[in-house]
Image (cartoon, rainbow, N blue to C red):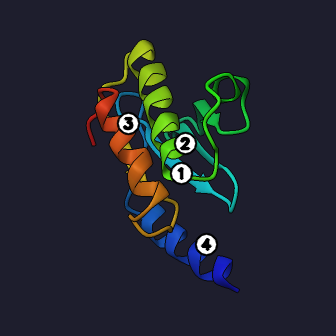
């Protein structure tokens, strides 16, 4: 039942946050064991890129995927990819989750990687 509230909050938040070609939306999804993030351009309804703790890039780092260090590392990885693609500014969509714990750690990692939101 917790997920119903989260989805409701996410829909309410998503009404105001829109990703564009110049400033994509950075969407966060977390489960008990993993966390993933995507860059979305809502104007053409397209996913620009995404990373997860389940991906090969993260598996090579050898960090636990279910803690804040793993989330911070994913933030740094997505920031590096976004900067390579030419995006400096993004809109942060926390996906209905509280800005706390792993979500906050991911955001801090993305900021350390050079993203502004």
* Classed neighbour count for the residue bearing mark 1: other residues with Cα under 10 Å, few (<14), some (14–19), many (≥20): many
Instruction: Say what secondary structure mark 3 lies in.
Output: helix
Residue found at x 67% / y 60%: 31
- The disc, 3 or 2, on the residue closer to the chain's N-terminal end is 2
Residue 65 percent location from the top left of the image: 64, 45
Give the label, 3 or 2, closer to the camera.
2
Q: CA distance from mark 4 to mark 3?
A: 24 Å
Q: CA distance from mark 2 to mark 1?
A: 14 Å
Give the label, 1 or 3, closer to the camera.
3
| Quadrant showing the N terminus | bottom right
Q: CA distance from mark 1 to mark 3?
A: 12 Å
Give the label, 1 or 4, closer to the camera.
1
From this view, report whether residue 79 is shown above or below residue 28. Answer: above
From this view, report whether residue 20 is shown above or below residue 86. Answer: below
Q: CA distance from mark 3 to mark 2?
A: 12 Å
* Classed neighbour count for the residue bearing mark 3: other residues with Cα under 10 Å, few (<14), some (14–19), many (≥20): many
The quadrant in which residue 8 appears is bottom right
* Image mark count: 4
Q: Nearer the viewer, residue 28 or 39?
A: 28
User: Which residue corresponds to mark 2?
Assistant: 70
Q: Nearer the viewer, residue 53 or 97?
A: 53
User: Which residue corresponds to mark 3?
Assistant: 110
Residue farthest along the bottom direction in this orientation:
1
From this view, report whether residue 55 is shown above or below residue 65. Answer: above
Q: CA distance from mark 2 to mark 4?
A: 24 Å
- The disc, 1 or 4, on the residue closer to the chain's N-terminal end is 4
User: Which residue corresponds to mark 4?
Assistant: 7
User: Which residue corresponds to mark 1?
Assistant: 28
Residue farthest along the left direction in this orientation:
116
- The disc, 1 or 3, on the residue closer to the chain's N-terminal end is 1
């Amino acid at each position: 039942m917790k997920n119903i509230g989260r989805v409701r909050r996410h829909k309410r938040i998503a009404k105001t946050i829109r990703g564009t070609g110049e400033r994509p939306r950075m969407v966060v999804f977390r489960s008990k064991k993993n966390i993933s993030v995507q860059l979305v351009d809502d104007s053409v309804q397209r996913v620009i890129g995404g990373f997860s703790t389940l991906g090969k890039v993260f598996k090579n780092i050898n960090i636990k995927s279910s803690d804040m260090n793993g989330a911070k590392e994913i933030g740094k990885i997505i920031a590096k990819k976004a900067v390579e693609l030419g995006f400096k500014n993004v809109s942060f969509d926390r996906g209905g989750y509280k800005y706390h714990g792993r979500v906050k750690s991911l955001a801090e990692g993305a900021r350390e990687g050079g993203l502004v939101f």
